[in-house]
Image (cartoon, rainbow, N blue to C red):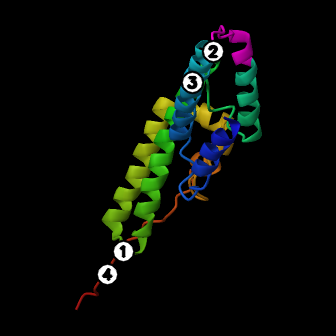
Amino acid sequence: MFMSLVEIINEFSKYKNDGIHYKNLCEELLKYFKVQKRCVREEVTSQGQKFKTYEWNNIVNALYTTFESKKIKRLCYLEKDNDENKKKDVLNIHEEFRNFCIEKKARLRNISDMNFEQCNDYMSWITEKKRGLQAIDPNYENIREYKEYFDIHHNCNYPWLVSNTPDVTCSQITRSRGKT
């Protein structure tokens, strides 16, 4: 049971180029947990024994120890987790931020071909996306608190987010002619 759990975590951890997809990872782990609980319950009852919650809780505690060792306990939740709502909120914010970073990376690939207007549009897009993140996470409080999970790219992480340092500088070439 624990080996499969670790395999799921390791599989998701392989894909770090655009940050780990924590929301999908946590959802996958929760599904795995529920299937395992159902299997254990069926196995115990098929043997004519009673499924004992306190014994299952020992297994849950061991799972949380695995979560802790893999550094995902702050984000991923199982049933009856007191912080489930907070974790879901953080995972939703992370999903938005990660998607933003992936799109930002794609847009930055074309930066050398941008004219002044396109560069300005890019800068406006960044500002708009940052406002959207502020709307779901005022003052980036959750991103700050969980910043180790929001380190998507070198130029898309918490320090970059709060620095307000632009990725690019837009400049326009002007040509003037002298009077003849």
- First in sequence, mark 2 or 3: give its number: 3
Spatial CA span between label 4 and label 3:
75 Å
Does the rendering let one see residue 138?
no
Q: Amino acid at mark 2?
A: Gln
Task: State the residue position of label 1.
Answer: 113
**Circle 3 residue:** 39
Spatial separation of the CA atoms under disc 1 and disc 4? 20 Å
Q: Position of residue 155 (x, y in %)?
A: 58, 58
Q: Residues within 10 Å of mark 3 (few under 14, many from 20)?
A: few
In the rendered structure, find residue 175 and report the number of the disc placed on it.
4
Disc 4 on helix, strand or loop?
Answer: loop
* Cα–Cα gap, marks 2 and 3: 12 Å
Instruction: Name which residue type carries label 4.
Output: Arg
Q: In 3D space, how far apart are the residues under numbered discs 3 and 1 (Cα atoms)?
A: 56 Å
Q: Which residue is mark 2?
A: 47
Q: Where does the magenta region start and end? A: 47-57
